[in-house]
Image (cartoon, rainbow, N blue to C red):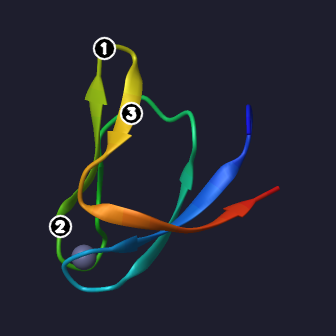
């Protein structure tokens, strides 16, 4: 999954968002503004969402 996208579901509101799996920036939910990923030392960590599926 080197250069893939993932579909994630916000834990707070259930909104699905597509993220680049190697994104290094913080991403927030477009619906409720919950933090979905945070940047930790050069790579992102999923914090407020769960993975629904991997996209090619
Ligand atoms: Zn949300």
Q: Which residue is mark 1?
A: 41
Residue 35's spot in the image, x, y percent?
A: 20, 55
At x 56%, y 33%, the residue is: 22
Relative placement, left or right, of 50 versus 47 is: right
Q: Which residue is mark 2?
A: 33
At x 25%, y 75%, the residue is: 11
Q: Is mark 2 within 8 Å of ligand 1?
A: yes
Q: Secondary structure at mark 1?
A: loop
What is the quadrant of the C terminus in the image? bottom right
What is the quadrant of the N terminus in the image? top right
**Mark 2 vs 1, N-terminal side:** 2
Q: Which residue is mark 3?
A: 44
Crowd class of label 3 (few under 14; some 14 to 19; many from 20; radius 10 Å) = some
Which quadrant of the figure has residue 9?
Answer: bottom left
Q: Nearer the viewer, mark 2 or mark 3?
A: 3
Give the answer, above or below, for where 35 lies relative to 38.
below
Give the answer, above or below, for where 38 lies relative to 13.
above
Residue 51's spot in the image, x, y percent?
A: 49, 64
Determine the CA span between mark 2 and mark 1. 22 Å
């Amino acid at each position: 999954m080197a250069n893939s996208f993932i579909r994630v579901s916000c834990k707070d509101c259930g909104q699905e968002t597509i993220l680049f799996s190697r994104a290094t920036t913080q991403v927030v939910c477009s619906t409720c503004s919950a933090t979905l990923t945070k940047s930790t030392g050069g790579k992102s960590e999923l914090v407020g969402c769960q993975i629904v599926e991997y996209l090619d």
